[in-house]
Amino acid sequence: MLELPGLIDPHVHVREPGQTHKEDWDTVTQAALAGGVTTILAMPNTKPPIFDASTLDLALNAAKSKARCDYAQFLGAGPDNADTAAALAPQTAGLKMYLDSTFGELRLDDMTLWMPHFEKFPKDYPIVLHSESRTMAAGILFAAVYDRPIHIAHVSLKEEILLIKAAKERGIKVTCEVCPHHLFLTADSSSLTLGEGRRGEGRREVRPRLAGKEDVEALWQNLDVIDCFATDHAPHTLAEKDSDNPPPGFPGLETLLPLLLIAVDDGRLTIDDVIKRLHTNPRRIFNIPEQPETWIEVDETAEYEIKAADQFTRCGWTPFDGWKVKGKVRKVVLRGQVAFEDGKVLAEQGYGRNVRGLES
Ligand code: DOR
Ligand code: ZN
């Protein structure tokens, strides 16, 4: 049995408030615990988006009564909330800026709208950027100009990881995360489980898009540049994914560890690489306090098939359905309590704590 610290997923779409038919604070934290994740950082592109004190309250009140693992909530950067966001920073996971194509309403195109956020958001709380390709390059220039840390979400391209490497070498304060789906799937992956006929193509939709072989290889070759693994757990129902207008996103909390353990098994990663990117680094980057008496137990010899029906996420599917993996989370102990054991979530709703400690 492998014993690991409680995993931290810095990129999770909870869907509450507003879209609880996809997921809510209860189901997402059950999925987290089943995946060995004891802390999630929640994204703000809900309905309504989380961008001021009253919308932050909406999310935190739901979390307080329903979450079964620990959490913090990001605030979204809008066109005119830089002062509000800066004042609320201590109650948040950090600030999320959507600068490229995404799901929901939070998107800032004009760079003059980025400036007040870079000027005002306290430097000891992270700014996380959804920024791809050349937009990412602009984000890195902002980090250099304003001399403040940024964290780049879901890096997927060779040109991105190489630029982040170069920026780090120059001392620019940039960190980054990569999602398992960008490490294990390509745009033409035949292993991606699709539905019948063309309709299933919507199941490939994700932002950033799945990339090419060369991009995926570049990510693996530059593991030392990757600070964190993050799921970008983005649940949408199968009916939505198979519709004429499929929303982008994959669930990921329950497949995170078994996928990474494939790479440990075939020698591309070590367990220490995993601990660093799913615990040590996210703790440091996002200022997350230590969870006392918290660990997870993983049976690294258990072989099984990933099945959508076995998952706790409400969305009812996974792009990795049918994948054969090795390594199963057997037990999660969170702050001294057994929170998950042998397929059962034991932590009650409301057991989860806001790691920012200022629950409203
Ligand atoms: O695939 C994605 N899904 N990319 C995003 O940027 C948003 C996310 C979502 O919320 O569904
Ligand atoms: Zn996301």
Image: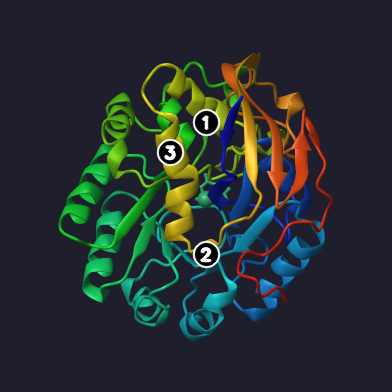
**284 on left or right of 103:** left
- Tell me if I can see residue 185 in this picture: no
- Tell me if I can see residue 142 in this picture: yes
Provide residue 34's location: percent of width, then percent of height: 70, 36
Q: Nearer the viewer, residue 244 or 328?
A: 328
Classify 10 Å Cα crowding around label 3: few (below 14), some (14-19), many (20 and above). Answer: some
Pointer 1 residue Cβ closer than 8 Å to ligand 1: no
In which quadrant is the C terminus drawn? bottom right
Counting every numbered tag in the picture gives: 3
**220 on left or right of 253:** left
Classify 10 Å Cα crowding around label 1: few (below 14), some (14-19), many (20 and above). Answer: many
Element under label 2?
A: loop
Going by the numbered disc 3, the residue's amino acid type is Arg
Q: Residue at coordinates 56% horizontally, 26% vertically from top-left?
A: 258
Chain-order first, disc 1 or disc 2: 2
Provide residue 285's location: percent of width, then percent of height: 42, 59
Chain-order first, disc 2 or disc 3: 2
Badge 2 is on which residue?
Answer: 106
**206 on left or right of 143:** right
Badge 1 is on which residue?
Answer: 204
Going by the numbered disc 1, the residue's amino acid type is Arg
Pointer 2 residue Cβ closer than 8 Å to ligand 1: no
Q: Residue at coordinates 29% horizontally, 49% vertically from top-left?
A: 133
Q: Nearer the viewer, residue 36 or 175?
A: 36
Q: Residue at coordinates 59% horizontally, 60% vertically from top-left?
A: 45
Badge 3 is on which residue?
Answer: 209
Q: Residue at coordinates 27% horizontally, 69% vertically from top-left?
A: 142
Measured along the vertical axis of the image, is residue 219 above or below residue 279? above
